[in-house]
Image (cartoon, rainbow, N blue to C red):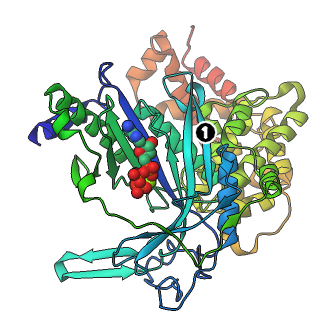
């Protein structure tokens, strides 16, 4: 044990453990995902355990609390969501699937069994593709095959209060629909595992079937690890991506150590389940103590039949998938960096309350197209990206302003007009920043009654006095620049500018001028004046 702790200390200084060629890692994933259907899987309760976290047993119907005599009624929305996922993962949807009972007793599962799909799962034989350029894996291309997707119900939640010797049960989560997705053991590297999880999350979010958040437990990942084809170890309690990666690395090093010592026949002979506790894994149970679940078909739920027609309809209704969106954004005419493309295309979590990618992406594309058309040859392709991602989103976050309110006023057409003002030199960039901030601040102040009208930028520029000063009085400018030099009060710096040792520092003086003139005077004019006053001859 101590040995592994010291191994972890080493990890503190280097980010990743190293994969050794003679010790082949093999991983397979089992991912449980909560579907965000309106109702639960077998009852009419609201499916919103997350929002009701402070109201235990609030969304719990007779069936969710397993009242004797209550019966399950299948929610077809869950079947629709599962079909979307199956199609997006290139799976074969089973024409007939069925629900089975998996028996075990636990306080948060008062039925005495979990309803799952054991004998005939919903879909089989799919795949998800990973690539070097989009997903950052080492190989050019990987295809991870998916064994199956099964629909099942979530359990309730047990809450332990050790100091009060209390064990509480909250059944808000009981019967929330889940999909368990099982991959083949084809991951040979933790980078691929990370890429797969990110891609799977993006897929769930773009299909609108789950928040995909690990932090809230909406998505839970179990990782199976084996080295050199010894028995696999199933790792549980992995609350975030970093735990997942660290746990795989810890387990890999543990297996390598056991094999090097020649103890694999003793210690890696049987499948076991281990739990990650933040710094190491610890054995939970082995195969010998595994429970006999006494699976049996659930006689209360009819079999699920999915027609070819439904599959085709769903396939046609699926939006563009994450890879296709990214490929579009990083190529002509958008030419976005992968990082910017990901900001526009994927939510970093499923609770993007201020803006959603479903609004942001079309806003960007429409603004870009509109701007490109208006700008003609003068088009600056980076302008829409930087002003949408950095300025607009930055301000939206700063002002806690919902994007849906912003786009009522700043439509793609008006935002592209705003960009054109910069391209045509009608307004400087510092002034444009001020203008955008004014507009959004104004919106924030009357958030509840935002009118549906577009903005007249020209009159706002006049109103705020932001137009570039065309006829600057040179005497006044000389005075302003002299006072800046005095204010800066740094003779060494001024000397270094004069001699040409630090030519770039003149930009600092120009910056002060831009700030004081609120960007209304051209930076070139400032630079010229400073050079004149300092008698710079470089
Ligand atoms: N040799 C192996 N090395 C690593 N992973 C493996 C190996 N063999 C199988 N796996 C992985 O183990 C997982 C098996 O999951 P599956 O749901 O089929 O069964 P289970 O874990 O026994 O059941 P449960 O759902 O009750 O946990 C898959 O992700 C698969 O890829
Ligand atoms: Mg398992
Ligand atoms: Mg499983």
Position of residue 426 measured from the top left corner of the image (x, y, whole percent):
81, 37
Q: Residue furthest top?
A: 538
Residue 121 sits in quarter: bottom right
Lateral position of residue 81 relative to residue 225, left or right: right
Can residue 370 be seen here?
A: yes
Helix, strand or loop status at disc 1: strand
Say how many tags the image has: 1
Residue at x 66%, y 69% (from the top left corner): 445
Q: Residues within 10 Å of mark 1 (few under 14, many from 20)?
A: many
Lateral position of residue 434 relative to residue 228, left or right: right
Position of residue 438 measured from the top left corner of the image (x, y, whole percent):
69, 56
Can residue 466 be seen here?
A: no
Disc 1: residue Cβ within 8 A of ligand 1's nearest atom: no
Task: Please state, as top left, top right, bottom left or bottom right, where the N terminus lies in the image.
Answer: top left
Task: Please state, as top left, top right, bottom left or bottom right, where the C terminus lies in the image.
Answer: top right
Q: Which residue is mark 1?
A: 127
Residue at x 57%, y 8% (from the top left corner): 537
In the depicted view, which residue is nearer to us: 81 or 440?
81
Position of residue 116 measured from the top left corner of the image (x, y, whole percent):
51, 65
In the depicted view, which residue is nearer to us: 62 or 462?
62
Residue 63, compared with residue 148, is above or below; it is below
Residue 491, compared with residue 120, is above or below; it is above
Position of residue 71 measured from the top left corner of the image (x, y, whole percent):
57, 85
Residue 43 sits in quarter: bottom right
Residue 255, compared with residue 42, is above or below; it is above
Residue at x 66%, y 29% (from the top left corner): 523
Lateral position of residue 70 relative to residue 436, left or right: left
């Amino acid at each position: 044990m101590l040995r592994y702790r010291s191994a972890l200390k080493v990890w503190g200084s280097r980010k990743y453990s190293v994969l050794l060629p003679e010790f082949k890692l093999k991983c397979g994933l089992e991912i449980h995902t909560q579907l965000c259907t309106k109702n639960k899987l077998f009852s009419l309760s609201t499916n919103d355990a997350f929002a009701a976290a402070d109201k235990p047993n609030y969304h719990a119907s007779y069936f969710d609390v397993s009242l004797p005599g209550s019966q399950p009624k299948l929610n077809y929305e869950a079947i629709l969501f599962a079909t979307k996922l199956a199609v997006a993962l290139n799976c074969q949807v089973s024409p007939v699937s069925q629900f089975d009972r998996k028996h075990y007793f636990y306080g948060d599962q008062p039925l005495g069994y979990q309803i799952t799909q054991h004998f005939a799962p919903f879909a089989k034989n799919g795949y998800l593709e990973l690539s070097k350029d989009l997903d950052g894996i080492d190989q050019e291309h990987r295809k991870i095959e998916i064994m199956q997707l099964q629909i099942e119900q979530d359990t309730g939640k047990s809450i332990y209060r050790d100091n009060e010797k209390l064990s509480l049960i909250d059944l808000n989560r009981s019967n929330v629909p889940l999909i368990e997705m099982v991959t083949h053991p084809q991951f040979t590297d933790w980078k691929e595992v990370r890429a797969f999880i990110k891609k799977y999350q993006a897929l769930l979010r773009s299909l609108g079937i789950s928040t995909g958040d690990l932090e809230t437990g909406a998505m839970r990942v179990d990782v199976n690890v084996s080295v050199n084809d010894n028995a696999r170890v199933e790792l549980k309690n992995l609350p975030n991506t970093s735990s997942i990666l660290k746990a795989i690395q810890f387990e890999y090093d543990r297996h390598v150590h056991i094999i090097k010592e020649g103890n694999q026949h003793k210690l890696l002979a049987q499948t076991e389940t281990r739990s990650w506790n933040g710094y190491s894994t610890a054995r939970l149970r082995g195969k010998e103590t595994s429970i006999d679940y006494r699976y049996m078909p659930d006689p209360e739920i009819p079999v699920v039949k999915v027609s070819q027609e439904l599959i085709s309809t769903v396939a046609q209704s699926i939006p563009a998938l994450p890879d296709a969106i990214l490929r579009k954004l990083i190529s002509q005419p958008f030419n976005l960096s992968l990082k910017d493309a990901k900001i526009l295309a994927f939510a970093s979590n499923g609770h993007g309350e201020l803006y959603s990618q479903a609004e942001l992406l079309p806003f960007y594309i429409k603004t870009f197209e509109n701007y490109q058309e208006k700008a003609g040859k003068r088009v600056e392709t980076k302008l829409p990206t930087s002003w949408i991602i950095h300025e607009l989103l930055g301000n939206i976050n700063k002002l806690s302003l919902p994007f849906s309110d912003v786009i009522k006023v700043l439509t793609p057409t008006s935002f592209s007009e705003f960009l054109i003002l910069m391209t045509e030199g009608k307004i400087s960039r510092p002034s444009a920043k001020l203008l955008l901030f004014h507009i959004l601040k104004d919106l924030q102040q009357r958030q509840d009654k935002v009118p549906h009208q577009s903005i007249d930028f020209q009159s706002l520029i006049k109103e705020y006095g932001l137009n570039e000063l065309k006829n600057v009085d040179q005497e006044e400018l000389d005075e302003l620049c002299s006072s800046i030099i005095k204010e800066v009060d740094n003779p060494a710096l001024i000397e270094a500018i004069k001699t040409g040792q630090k030519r770039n520092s003149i930009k600092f003086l120009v910056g002060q001028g831009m700030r004081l003139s609120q960007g209304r005077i051209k930076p070139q004019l400032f630079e010229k004046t400073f050079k004149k006053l300092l008698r710079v001859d470089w």
